[in-house]
Image: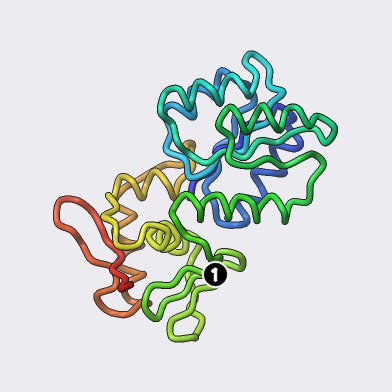
Amino acid sequence: MRVLVIEDQPTLAGQLAQALREAAYAVDVVHNGVDALHAGETGDYDAVLLDLGLPQMDGITVLKKWRAGGRKMPVLILTARDNWHEKVTGIDAGADDYLAKPFHMEELLARVRALIRRAGGHARADLACGPVVLDTRSGRVTVDGHAIALTSHEYRVLDYLMHHRNEVVSRTGLVEHIYAQDFDRDSNTVEVFIARLRKKLPPGLIQTVRGLGYRLVCEG
């Protein structure tokens, strides 16, 4: 899953990016409203953390422009604790949730997980596909109740497929969502991760849809 962090305070931006990366997200960071607008218009993000007090263009304006342009990615706005009117304005502008500063990083990560789950139509924190269960809170993956070991990139691929169960996901789409923008992306490596996952998961769970991509086949 790929997350965009928009925060003009370098220290906080670095802390947010580090926490998200440690939670297996691919993270892009920008520090002003103009760059934020461009990133949101051109990038494919599963969630956005948006500070409202940005230089060059404020966060509310950025958000309104995204929504007016049809951008639907989940947005969590970060506000000052005593600025209750910012929360209302942000929600009205199209934000999906808000978090007041200062906040606990665990709460922020929980809210990001919830935003991504809701965007995919999932109510539970643990995602299931047949005998495979992925716990989005702990990052633990089990098959028939037995934990399996995954590398960070294998986990990212499976996580994205689990959030889009029974949907055809293109190789390009996977690349967009498992790598940050500044990473040296190579779509061929996705095939390697898929091959490794197939060795660790039940046969037939990940199907190749010729010419289109992959599908995680789940019943129910």
Q: How is the image coloured?
A: rainbow
Q: Is residue 215 above or below residue 105?
A: below
Q: Amino acid at mark 1?
A: Asp
| Residue 216, horizontal then vertical, whole percent | 31, 65
Q: Neighbour class for label 1 at 10 Å: few (<14), some, many (≥20)?
A: some
Query: What residue do we see at 42% from left, 58% from top?
Result: 163
| Residue 108, horizontal then vertical, whole percent | 69, 49
| Residue 158, horizontal then vertical, whole percent | 41, 63
Query: For residue 164, what is the image quadrant?
Result: bottom left
Q: Nearer the viewer, residue 23 or 91?
A: 91
Q: Secondary structure at mark 1?
A: strand
Count of marks placed on residues: 1
Q: Is residue 86 left or right of residue 90?
A: right
Image quadrant in which the C terminus is located: bottom left
| Residue 150, horizontal then vertical, whole percent | 47, 70
Q: Dot 1 corresponds to which residue?
A: 135
Query: For residue 30, what is the image quadrant?
Result: top right
